[in-house]
Image (tube, helix red, strand yellow):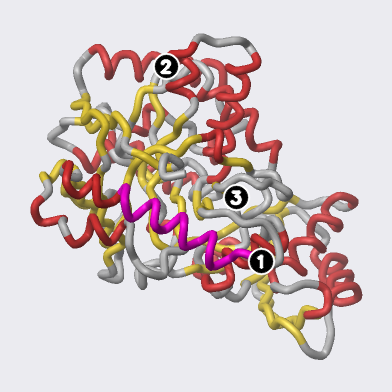
Amino acid sequence: MNRLFKEADILIPHTSNPEKWAVIACDQFTSDKAYWQRVRDAVGKAPSTLNMIIPECDLGSINEDERIKEINATMENYLEEGVFDEYKDSYIYVERTMENGAVRPGLLGVVDLEQYDYSPDSEAMIHATEKTVVERIPPRVRVRKDAALEFPHVIMLCDDYEKRIVETATKNARRMKVLYDFDLIENGGHICGRLVDAETAREINEQFKKYCDTMEERYRGADGKLFLFAIGDGNHSLATAKTCYENLKAQGADTGALELARYSLVELENIHDPSIVFEPIHRIIFGADIEKLLAELRDKCCADTGFEIEWIAGSRRGKLTLDEKKGKLAVAVLQHFLDDYLSENAGEIDYIHDDPALIELASGEDAIGFLLPPMGKGQLFLGVMADGVLPRKTFSMGHSREKRYYLEGRRIR
């Protein structure tokens, strides 16, 4: 059980411009091409993880096959040019200082994909928290399947009340070697990574086993399936890694290839750390008949009491009360309605993390946005155990710029 998460052979770039190397996850700022253009301008021709990803805002507007070839070639070139230092069989302790000054600690290692599943009825020990949109997996598989390297933006959460695992690294951080320490571009805050020493790693692994035992004792008899770790961010990337691994097994790949593909880099964080705050993910609809959408929403989903949400459409704003009998969360009621409505009517949905960004986008023409309330993080594990998964894009761990940046890497081929 204690090898669900373990040390890895981790690649760290040695570069004089680390701020140009690290860029935010590809699924952020999907409706903000200006953000990604600023990143491209800032990076220029410097070595960068930007050269090894496809920002989702670019999908559909580029030659995907050519871009994937460029990505694969860039990875091989970086390896041949000696861009990386490799730290064998190691954990990296990460401290992310955010814009508000809070420090979010995490531990970088690999998860065993045999122990992960994103299906709602899964009994795996590592579980998705939200519904996985399977249509988002194939484009990511095309990027990963021939790639030599992976760079994680996955954050895995533990329900560690006793603060045993990540906090073991925190208390010993001062004696660890600093591997990187710099400000992230586009107001992403500051990041510092330290190589976990052997003594601390042994203690972490001991505490990890205790955590697994405690979880089974705490939730024995709970309504729903027991699981030990929840994927808080980057689930579609982990689902992609899982798919590639299963494809290799089906193809009869050799043992060495399977061993590399079986694991994937993630950052483990404790849901009970005060730096972790669940932010709502808002909804915006482009190209819909706004009056018709609002009328149907009022007719089918509203009541005198329940969840209050705000809508913005151009210069107009209003409030609605969603019927609490139709779901346990406001986001569930709204998302189910929007799924049904958009299956039969014109309109495209996007998911926006920050209030100002949603308001700005919804204030334009031909758009309507919905501001949603946050979800209490204390209900995450029990909620998933009871219901399998939460509605997709239920919550965000912090604001857009607080998402994980691609930085550390690992060979996967």
Q: Quadrant of residue 274?
A: bottom left
Q: CA distance from mark 1 to mark 2?
A: 42 Å
Residue at point 28%, 57% (across, down): 96
What residue did someone put label 1 on? 221
Q: Position of residue 95 (x, y in %)?
A: 25, 56
Residue at point 49%, 21% (across, down): 67
Instruction: Find out whether residue 219 is within the magenta segment.
Output: yes
Q: Is residue 77 above or below residue 332?
A: above
Lower position in the chain sequence, tag 1 or tag 3: 3
Q: Which mark is residue 413?
A: 2
Q: Which mark is residue 128?
A: 3
Query: For the residue carrying disc 3, how many other residues have a C-alpha within 10 Å: few (<14), some (14-19), or many (20+)?
Result: many
Instruction: Find out whether residue 338 is within the magenta segment.
Output: no
Q: CA distance from mark 2 to mark 3?
A: 25 Å
Residue range corresponding to the magenta coloring: 205-220
Residue at point 22%, 60% (across, down): 170
Query: For the residue carrying disc 2, how many other residues have a C-alpha within 10 Å: few (<14), some (14-19), or many (20+)?
Result: some
Q: Position of residue 74 (x, y in %)?
A: 35, 18
Q: CA distance from mark 1 to mark 3?
A: 21 Å
Q: Position of residue 190 (x, y in %)?
A: 23, 56
Horizontal arrangement in the rendering, residue 129 relative to residue 339 (left or right): left
Give amino acid for label 3: Ala
Q: Position of residue 91 (x, y in %)?
A: 27, 41
Is residue 180 something one can see in this rendering? no
Q: Is residue 284 above or below residue 264?
A: below
Q: What is the secondary structure assignment of the residue under circle 1?
A: loop
